[in-house]
Image: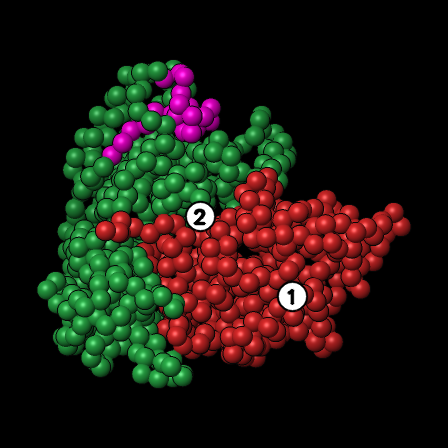
Chain colours: A red, B green
Amino acid sequence: MSKYYLNYLDELESEAIFVLREVWAQFENPVILFSGGKDSILVTHLAKKAFYPAKIPFPLMHVDTGHNFPETIEFRDNIIKELGAQLIVGSVQESIDEGRVAEEKGKNATRNALQITTLLDAIEANKIDCAIGGGRRDEEKARAKERFFSHRDDFGQWDPKNQRPELWNIFNGKHFEGEHFRAFPISNWTEMDVWNYIKRENIAIPSLYFAHEREVVWRQDSWIPNSEFLVLEDHEEIVTKKIRFRTLGDITITGGVESNADTLEKIAAEVAGMRNTERGNRSDDKRSESAMEDRKRQGYF
Amino acid sequence: MLDNNQLLRFTTAGSVDDGKSTLIGRLLYDSKSIFEDQLEAIENTSKKKGHEGVDLALFTDGLRDEREQGITIDVAYRYFTTPKRKFIIADTPGHIQYTRNMVTGASTANVATILIDARHGVIEQTKRHAFIASLLQIPHIIVCVNKMDLVDFSEEVFNNIVSEFEEVSSKMLVKDVRFIPMSALLGDNVVNKSENMPWYQGAPMLHTLETMHISSDINKVDARFPVQTVIRPQRDGFIDYRGYAGRVASGILRTGDEVTVMPSGFTSKVKSINLHDKELEEAYAPMSVSITLEDDIDISRGDMIVRSNNKPEPSQDIEVMLCWLNNSAAKPRAKYTIKHTSNDQKAMIKEVVYKYDINTLERNSDDTDLAMNDIAKVKIRTTKPLMIDAYRENRTTGSIILVDDATNETVAAGMIV
């Protein structure tokens, strides 16, 4: 006799699958925003489950800043091949070349904010009416306010003070031409839930998440990886360390942590003992107290 | 891994300065769920604002406007895990003008926590929140009598508040109410047992949340499977596969069960239940699965698969308790889109039977205008039958929302009477 209640991971899974199926049923042209990070990999895995034995019925869209970890791109291309899915790429480099955005200046310049224009352009060009993201409410305080179905106006803007009420499990995806939605199936997952689930389901993730030897430089309280985009300050020095990344963004801003965790078991154990948030190593969030909210208002994922 | 590893959703309610944010901050802080960088951030802000010590309330307000005004505007969701359970907190606003957001946060909750300032006792706002919790049929209520430090931890004050609240709640549909005297500011009876109130024999709040029986909160009797979408793979090995994807709203479905497809009324048997590449013997709420049937029947989104010997009531005339959520008032006899499970129909509000005076909780059948935050009993006529259950039996098949076709906004939430 089974106990007839779900454990928390199964309940989160069931909720996410429900949301993904609602997206498919309510929108004409949805995509999964795929960055190659663990959250978008998780969403893709859940989409596989939601529509099995059919293929995932929507394309994956990658907003490529041009400042990638090579491992991420390799992983992306492999997963696309394996799923037989369509890949849409929005290129920040192209947006720069076309003069749509200007590269930031200064030593902490990143391409993070530039993604907004590229993302919104790609949404418009491909007539996308819902972009599914791996955003989680535990990531950041502005994200904690996010609905499962999050409305964006025809400029792609989020208005946190005028969100649609979202009751029970009834999602309202109705919108006018030119507007779109962001959908967040894993809203209720925490970083720990993600790792526990990845471990349980044995989901493949990029090698960057596992501890490995890498050339890095100590900057802003974390190990920033060496890359062709890195400009060294006089006092800075490249060293080789055994590190892993807890979150993946642009190679220019993603800080690694020293670690020996080279298996999913060890990662889960390490994350359980962490005393700092995941985004604590993302310098883009440290710019101001409302950095994420401000970006999201403009259309950031 | 967690011991009892269930997920418990709770919501916080209380009027503006009752210390909701402080309570959540305390719960997270004492259960060691605040990370060091988050703590550092609120320590800095506390200092900048000239507070003595750390203002735990700062932890919850996520929007710039909220931090500036020191109030909560929209629902925020918080998470923490103990060795026993995973918790989702819907931190909802106390201001009356944001009642709709409170409803949003409360609609999926297992538990409503209602804060009362021990110095003020049961006030109108307490009654309003208890009333909304009872309307939404939140299965459990924890009344947190807060700021006990400001009334000398007096047992008498606490007991008076308990009887005041019990008098109010006796007129409502609340089943399970518990009372906990606490000081969120000092941490008494939140995570740790209070040494200041030896007269209190009960458990602190966290222990109560960890051990509360919630498995029966979902209806396990009436099998209801609203179809979200149909899965037709059209690929090798699955050419004839036709799966009905959905989430079990209530009850249990097993392979071999005699089922009826509503509203068409065709019957068949459950051939298989699938979750990804696994075949399951049975599925129960709230599992998302795909179902195949023995017979080829025309089934699409909006249909509901139910057990043949236990069917919901198809109806075009429904009575609901409606909470109006939108700035623009309800237009008399205007048409809206009604959303019920995966089904969309056009509907019209035919009649407002009575409206609740949210301050006195009395029914008023003279004033029938529906404006923002009003709660009223209304009669709705739909163009086609919906397969409905009463909300008190089934929160999923007993709830609806109304969408204004002119703006596409969700304008009302309703609970079927």
SS class, disc 2: strand
State whether the magenta stretch is mostly helix, strand or loop. Answer: loop
Q: Where is the N terminus of chain B found, in terms of image quarters?
A: top left
The residue shown at (41%, 67%) is A49
Can you give x and y, in whole percent of width and height, for residue A21 in the image? Answer: 38, 69
Place residue B335 in its image quadrant. bottom left
Q: Nearer the viewer, residue B352 or A94?
A: A94
Q: Nearer the viewer, mark 2 or mark 1?
A: 1
Q: CA distance from mark 2 to mark 1?
A: 30 Å
Can residue A146 be seen at all in this image of the molecule? no
The residue shown at (70%, 67%) is A70
What's the amino acid at mark 2? Tyr
Q: Is residue B186 magenta?
A: yes
Q: Chain of mark 2?
A: B
Can residue A267 be seen at all in this image of the molecule? yes
Q: Nearer the viewer, residue B352 or B413?
A: B413
Q: Residues within 10 Å of mark 2 (few under 14, many from 20)?
A: many
What's the amino acid at mark 1? Thr
Q: Nearer the viewer, residue B238 or B203?
A: B238
Q: Is residue B60 magenta?
A: no
**Residue that carries the numbered disc 2 in the rendered image:** B77
The residue shown at (83%, 52%) is A238
Q: Which mark is residue A72?
A: 1
Q: Residues within 10 Å of mark 1 (few under 14, many from 20)?
A: many
Can you give x and y, in whole percent of width and height, for residue B31 in the image? Answer: 47, 33
SS class, disc 1: helix
Q: Chain of mark 1?
A: A
**Does residue B251 appear to the left or right of B143 in the view shown?**
left
Magenta residues (range): B177-197
The residue shown at (27%, 25%) is B161
